[in-house]
Image (cartoon, rainbow, N blue to C red):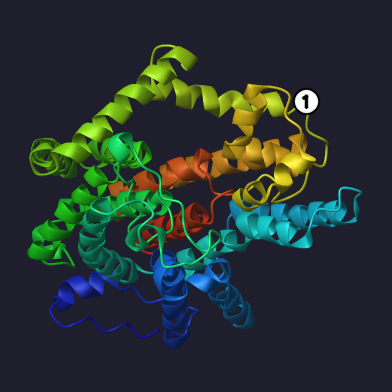
Amino acid sequence: MCSIAQPEIGFQPAITKAWTPAFPGIEEPHRRLIVRLVSAVYWLLIFEGVLRKWIFPQWGRELFFLRDPFVILVYILVFARRTRLPRSGLKEIGFAFSVAGLGLAFLCGVSDRRIPAYILVYGLRNYFLYMPLAFVIARYFNLWDLAQLARKTLMVCIPMALLVLVQLGAPANSPINAGLGEGPDEAYTIHTTENGIVRAAGMFTSDVGLTAFVSSSLAMALAFWVLPAQSRPVGRMLLVVSTASILMCLGLSGSRGAVLWSAVVMIGAFFGLFFVRPKMHFKATILIVTLVSGTAITLPVLFPQVTEAFVLRWIDAGRAESQAYGQGGVLARAAHESLLFCVLIPVTPPAGYGIGLAGNASWRLGLRDEVISFHSLDETNAAETDWGRNILEMGPILGCFFILFRISFVIRLVREALAATRRSGHSFPWLLCTYVAGMLFSGQITGNGTVNGYVWLFVGFCMAATLRARTFEEVFQ
C-alpha cells in the first residue's frame, strides 16, 4: 500500500483521509512529483502573463511556450515509470489523431505551399501536446490535490480582483494594461467597451485569459459552497472574500463571454445537482440566487460607469445579432455558428491547408490570408470558429472526425461526472464538468493557447475527480 500524503495543518484528519486515497502501482514520491509538475503548468498558465507583460516583456513570445518543457518532462517521467494511464477508447483515439496530425504536418511541409515549419509545430502543439496531460492528471491526482489547487486558486482571486480594479482606472495603452514592452510587438492590445471602458485582462495578456480564470474559479467556489461546512478544505472567510472577488472580476470584465461562460456554470450546477443530489440542489439554488441578486444590486451602485458601458455593449451586440441571426440574440448566434463550419467542407482540400495555419499566430502574422482564400462572409466567419478551424487545418474528413471526437468526449465527461456526483456526494466532478464541457465542445481550444491549456488541464481535473469520487473505481475502463 502506498503512503498517504499528510494533511496540512488546520484540516481534520478524518476529512483529509477521505480526500487522499492511496494509488496502487504508483510510488508516492513519484506521484507527488508529477502532481507538482502539473501544478506548475497550471500556475504558469495563470502567471505567465505577469512575466510576459511586466517582468520580461522583451521575451514575450518565447515565454508563451514556458509551460511546454514542464509538460514534456511529465510525459518523460510517466513513460519512464511505465505507468498505466486509465484505459479509454478516447485516449487511443486521441493518440491516433496525434499520429494523423504528424502525417498531415509532413505532407504540408513538403507541399508547394511551403508553410513555415514553426507554424506546423505551433499547430501540432495546440492540437496534441496537452491532450495526453488530461489522462496523466486523471491517473495521478486525487481529491486532496484538487482541493488544494482550488483553495490556492481562490486565494489568487483576491489580488486578481484588485488588479482588475486598478486596470479599469487606467487607459488601455498604459503599462498596467498593455505591459512594459517598448515596441508595438512587445505591447499587448487591450480592448475597450463603450465610453472607452477597459476590458481588463488581469494577470493575463488578453481578456480571454481572465474569462477562463473567472469562470473556472466560480466552478471551484460553487463546489466548496455546496459541500457540508465540516467537509470544506477551505475556511469560510476565504470562501466569502474569494467569491466576492470572483464576482467583482466578472462584473468588471466587460466581457460577454465571461458572463455567458459563468452562466453556463451556474445553470449546470442548478440542473445537474437537482438530478443527482436534491440537498445540494437546494443549497446551490439559494447560493446562485444570492450571488446573482447581490451582484446585480451592488455593482451598479459601486461602479455605475462600468455597469452602464457593459449594458450598452450587451444591448448593441444583441441588436446586431438579432438583425443577423433572427430572434434569440446571442443564443441564435451560437446556434448559427455551431453549423457554420459546414460551408468550409466543400471548399477545403482533402488534407486541409495545414495544421496551425488557421490559428491565432498564423492570422496575426498574415500567413493565413496568403494561403487561404475566402469567397463569402460566411466562410470568413466560419474560419473564426474552432470547428471551422478544424476543417481548414485537418481537411473535411479528418476535421469532421475530430469534431465528433470532441463531442464524444463531452458526452462521456457529462455522463461520468453526473454518475460520480450521484454516487459519492462530492460536487467536484459535476461542477468541474460544467466549466470545461462547453469549451471542449466548441471552444477555441486549437486556436488560443490559454484556452487550450485551461481546457485540457480541467478535463484532467474533472476525470480525476470522477475517478476518485467513485471509491477509486476506474470509470473510464
The residue sitting at 31% across, 40% down in the picture is: 196
Residue type at tag 1: Pro
The residue sitting at 14% across, 53% down in the picture is: 244
Give the quarter of the image for residue 20: bottom left
Q: Is residue 387 above or below residue 335?
A: below
Q: In this view, does 257 lie above or below 139?
A: above
Give the quarter of the image for residue 143: bottom left
| Residue 417 visible in the snapshot | no
Q: Is residue 412 above or below residue 382?
A: below
In this view, the residue in front, 12 or 353, is 353
In this view, the residue in front, 74 or 262, is 262
* Label 1, residues with CA under 10 Å away: few <14, some 14-19, many ≥20: few
Where residue 376 appears, x then y in whole percent?
68, 22
Where residue 198 appears, x then y in whole percent?
32, 46
In this view, the residue in front, 4 or 329, is 329
Give the quarter of the image for residue 309: top left
Residue that label 1 marks: 346
In this view, the residue in front, 375 or 86, is 375
The residue sitting at 43% across, 53% down in the picture is: 206
Total marks in image:
1
> Horizontally, is 395 left or right of 47 in the view?
right
Where residue 477 appears, x then y in whole percent?
53, 56
Image quadrant occupied by the N terminus: bottom left
Where residue 50 appears, x then y in whole percent?
39, 69
Residue at disc 1, secondary structure: loop
The residue sitting at 18% across, 55% down in the picture is: 245
> Horizontally, is 206 left or right of 336 in the view?
left
| Residue 91 visible in the snapshot | yes
